Image (tube, helix red, strand yellow):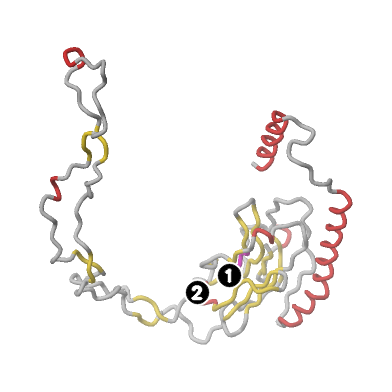
Amino acid sequence: YIKLLPAGTKAETFNGDDEYQIMFGPDLCGYDVSHIHMIFNHKGENLLKTDKIALEYSDKNEFTHLYTMHVKPDGTYEVFFDLESKAKGKLVDDWGFPKPMIDDPADKKPADWVDETMIDDPEDKKPDGWDDIPAQVPDPDATKPDDWDDEDDGEWEAPMVDNPEFKGEWRAKKIDNPAYKGEWSPKQIANPNYEEGVQLAAYDTAMLGFELWIVNNGTIFDNILVTDDIEYAKAQGEKLWRPVAKAEKEVKEQWDKENKPADEDVGSGMDEEDFEEEEEEEEKDEL
């Protein structure tokens, strides 16, 4: 991740425990982790986004990618992956920044508040004889074996089978609850920790650093840009990233065309036992 750092950070001893202002970058690990982190420091607390900025599985490949974070003075944001928008919204909605209004901690739900949306229909009555129907009955198609001896084997009884007439435990049908008052929520009051007119995620940044957790050898970071002009940032992306990404894909396609073996039928040149052994090796590699 890239980290924007405050003045006073010691570059010689910089590590993951040092305070930062913003942390931004991809989290790609294994098959199921594929998203972009975007964390803000607010008065000493690191605020994670309430929901992840997800990437597609197809985004995890060997090509060069461009990550862009745009934090705006009006309290909104947008995140781009390869110059395509991946997430946007309001900082105060998507992070744990102080909200203008909060729940009143003194407001309690009344004891007689009705939460149930549905109730049993008082007019619905259990049919007579409902409980007299057994769950299982003797199998009507079963017959006593010819070699069954009542004296030696005891009295023969047919095996039990599920009763097609059994309807289970009786339950009254549900109807709308006329006493339902709706979902209760505490009244809202002004948040004493909210600062009116203060720009969120605004920092005096002195330097930047990287915290690296790399699972793929050969990962390279370059073309780092911090600017207050999103259009300039996009233009630099088109100039510096787009040609590289396009050339990488062209080279990869050409290499695959020249070096990858033609598809062969499964089992060609090997017997069934050899194929099973190869399949086991592939499963081990995936693990």
Q: Name the residue under label 1.
A: 40
In the image as oriented, which residue stretches furthest toward the top? Answer: 152
Instruction: Say few, some or many: other residues with alpha carbon within 10 Å of mark 2 (under 14 / 14 to 19 / 20 or more).
Output: some
Q: Name the residue under label 2.
A: 97
Image coords of residue 277 (percent x, y): 69, 31
- The amino acid at mark 2 is Phe
Magenta part of the chain: 36-41
Would you place residue 126 above or below residue 71 in this image?
A: above
Q: Is 114 in front, or is 8?
A: 114
Would you place residue 185 above or below residue 136 in this image?
A: below
Residue 147 left/right relative to 213: left
Q: Residue at x 28, y 75 (%)?
A: 182
Q: Where does the N terminus fall, quadrant-wise? A: bottom right
Q: Do the residues labelled 1 and 2 touch (CB within 8 Å)?
A: yes
> For residue 46, which quarter of the picture?
bottom right
Image coords of residue 286 (percent x, y): 66, 43
Predominant SS along the magenta part: strand
Number of numbered tags placed on the structure image:
2
Q: Which of marks 1 and 2 is nearer the N terminus?
A: 1
